[in-house]
Image (cartoon, grey):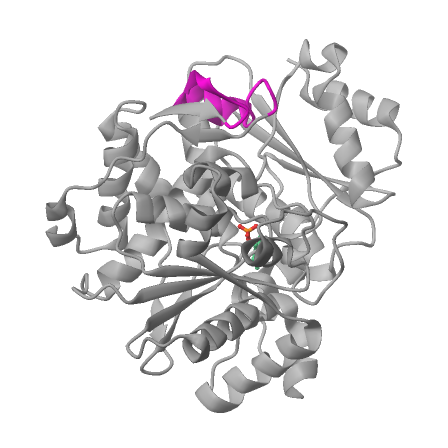
Amino acid sequence: MKLYSTKNTKQHFSFEYAVMQGIAPDGGLFMPLELPVLPGEFFRFEQNTFQSLCFDLASFLLSDSIPVLELERIITKSMTFSAPLVTLSDQISVLELWHGPSLAFKDFGAQFMAQVMSYFNREHQHPLNILVATSGDTGGAVAAGFHKVPGINVIILYPKGKVSHLQEKQLTTFGDNITALEIKGTFDDCQALVKQAFADPSLTDNLRLTSANSINIARLIPQMFYYFEAFRLRGYPSHNNVVFSVPSGNFGNLTAGLFSKKMGLPINKFIASTNINDIVPSYLKTGEYIPRRSVETLANAMDVGNPSNFMRMLHLYGSTWNNLKQDIIGYSYNDDQTVHAIRTLYNNYQYTADPHSAIAFLGLNDFINDSLQMDIDGIFLETAHPSKFKTTIDQALQTEIAIHPNLLKAASSPGSKFILPVDYHEIHSFLLDNFAN
Ligand SMILES: *Cc1c(COP(=O)(O)O)cnc(C)c1O
């Protein structure tokens, strides 16, 4: 796979360079130069398992960048959990993407990226140090992905008092090569400290530093796998009435779906379902892209005011609004509607959904109601396990839902962290003292 930068389509980069750098030197996002269309036989392959499907796709896309035997090892080590499809009604199913270690769909990207980085890092004598700022879900998935991966350390900065108790446990209880730094400041402070570290030669000359940014192309590729998996689980239906409703924030998940369609997966439409941070649904309606400050909602992993993957979506459609809106339709919902949807799913389908997925369900429902087509095969993506948002769900349903065993395990471990002020000099010394070559 060769890539270009969204800021300069003429310069091309290797997959290794794109993964290890995260972002192009000109500040653009890496995009695949081509997404080859799968041969028709692909959909008649007898992939018996999710892993064999992932391996076939990874080989098709990446065998010019990573030897096939290594790809097999990477898939075996990273795609270790399933993506089951649960039928709720004739027209509505849910693809559950929370069966990974941190109970969010971000595990697919983080697990795969960790194994790929470890492969590209294999010949280095000094460890690679990954510095991430997190406000919640990303840190937990990255920590789980890189835990015990040889030759790589992860240092997570998170804001004191701004992540939930359980989320903090998910960051602080790994130990080994995962270090948690609680910063006495905000998420923005954490992000500024990370930025400053990357730009500081007195650090980067003495320890190998990189990021595990959500825009890394190695996180998008494995997110294609589960769109194909939904079709495999359906037995590759001959109709082309499948629509996916994707609960979206930075739009990585939906972009991976668009990649899959480019490769020939016969997806009829994508529904971009958002909370009131409706920058993309507004764009789809008006043709004007107007980023703004994000607003806090119950579906907080989607509180994004300037979605980082929007440029990628535009590039896929030749930057043409008319083309984009043929494939994607947008809907947005407020917190009251989200709570109402959590109740509807529970009462009508005996299904407990987290707030993000409830929004995807609303988008799918409205699409079905607004559409003239009768035979829609609708699938909404469930991006997190509901017990990660226990307080919201308990209030909506007037009950006490069970906490997933993975969370209980983290909750009962003591955990360890370092507490540091918002002071670059202290972070600088901490990193040099603990991680210098
Ligand atoms: C990150 C996240 C999202 C948003 O995904 P994007 O790829 O940024 O659009 C949705 N739901 C949950 C639970 C998440 O953690």
Question: At which x and y percent is residue 308?
Answer: 60, 41
Horizontal side of 214 relative to 166 (left or right) equals left
For the point 83% across and 45% down, which residue is it? 186
Question: Residue 103, relative to residue 334: is it above or below?
Answer: above
Horizontal side of 123 relative to 103 (left or right) equals left
Horizontal side of 45 relative to 347 (left or right) equals left
The one nearer the camera, 366 or 416, is: 366
Is there any visible trace of residue 413 in the rendered image?
Answer: no
The answer to which quarter of the image holds residue 239 is bottom left
Residue 221 belongs to magenta span: no
Question: At which x and y percent is residue 287?
Answer: 57, 50
Residue 24 belongs to magenta span: yes
The one nearer the camera, 298 or 159, is: 298
Question: Residue 190, relative to residue 281: is it above or below?
Answer: above
The answer to which quarter of the image holds residue 285 is bottom right
Is there any visible trace of residue 406 in the rendered image?
Answer: yes
Residue interval drawn in magenta:
6-27
For the point 47% across and 42% down, which residue is it? 320
Indicate the quadrant containing the N terminus: top left, top right, bottom left or bottom right: top left
Question: At which x and y percent is residue 357?
Answer: 53, 68
The one nearer the camera, 114 or 6, is: 6
Question: At which x and y percent is residue 256?
Answer: 42, 46
For the point 52% across and 57% down, which residue is it? 104
